[in-house]
Amino acid sequence: MNIKIFSRCSVLFTLLFSMCMGQTDFNSRVNSIISGNIPLIHQDSLSTMLSSNRQPVLIDARSIEEYEVSHIKGAKFVDYDSFSPDMVNGIDKDEEVVVYCSIGYRSEKIGEKLKEMGYTNVLNLYGGIFDWKNNGHEVVDGQNVVTDSVHTYNKNWSKWLYKGIKVYE
């Protein structure tokens, strides 16, 4: 067999195997699961916003177990699995709302529901709490104590958290 053909086949096989095994980079993974129906905000822009006078409503769309391990300080818990309009009572429909989850899928779905309910200024945190923590931002636990722990949903998803302590059941 010609060495060039063997080399090309080897590279192609490696690429296909990596794709089949889900070994893509973080941004590729995020982009593969979100549809873009809700405008995105990136961690650096949210950080700037939170350190200024512009304070959005933060909504954490993960499970209570994930939220209790850690969340962005000041975030309101809204359970993705049992979401109801009552969970966002008291939030003005014109307020700026930033929804996040682990990497962006669940928060996008909650963002879509908020839009359907008449909320006008909803943003999805790109890369969720994983990207937030991976970029060195602070999270707090259920008692509002700063922590390095992040609930990664499960062992498979934990590969996307590069900084911090991975917690999963």
Image: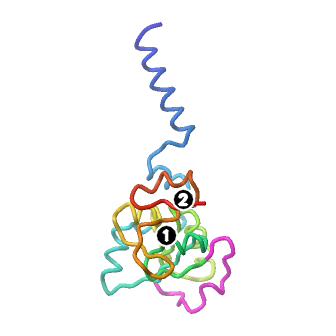
Q: Does the CB distance between marks 2 and 1 fall below 8 Å?
A: yes
Give residue 124's mark: 1
Residue 141 lies, in percent from the top left, at: 47, 76
Relative vertical location of residue 136 with respect to residue 56 in this rendering, above or below: above
Q: Nearer the viewer, residue 133 or 22?
A: 133
Q: Nearer the viewer, residue 72 or 126?
A: 72
- Which residue: 56% across, 60% down? 168
- Which residue: 42% across, 18% down? 7
Callout 2, which amino acid?
A: Ile
Q: CA distance from mark 2 to mark 1?
A: 10 Å
Q: Is residue 156 magenta?
A: no
Q: Secondary structure at mark 1?
A: strand
Mark 2 Cα-neighbour bin, 10 Å: few <14, some 14–19, many ≥20: some
Callout 1, which amino acid?
A: Asn
Q: Quadrant of residue 51?
A: bottom left
Q: Write down the residue under mark 2.
A: 34
Relative vertical location of residue 46 with respect to residue 56 in this rendering, above or below: above
Write the start and end of the magenta stretch as one range.
Answer: 79-96
Residue 46 lies, in percent from the top left, at: 37, 73
Relative placement, left or right, of 112 versus 9 is right
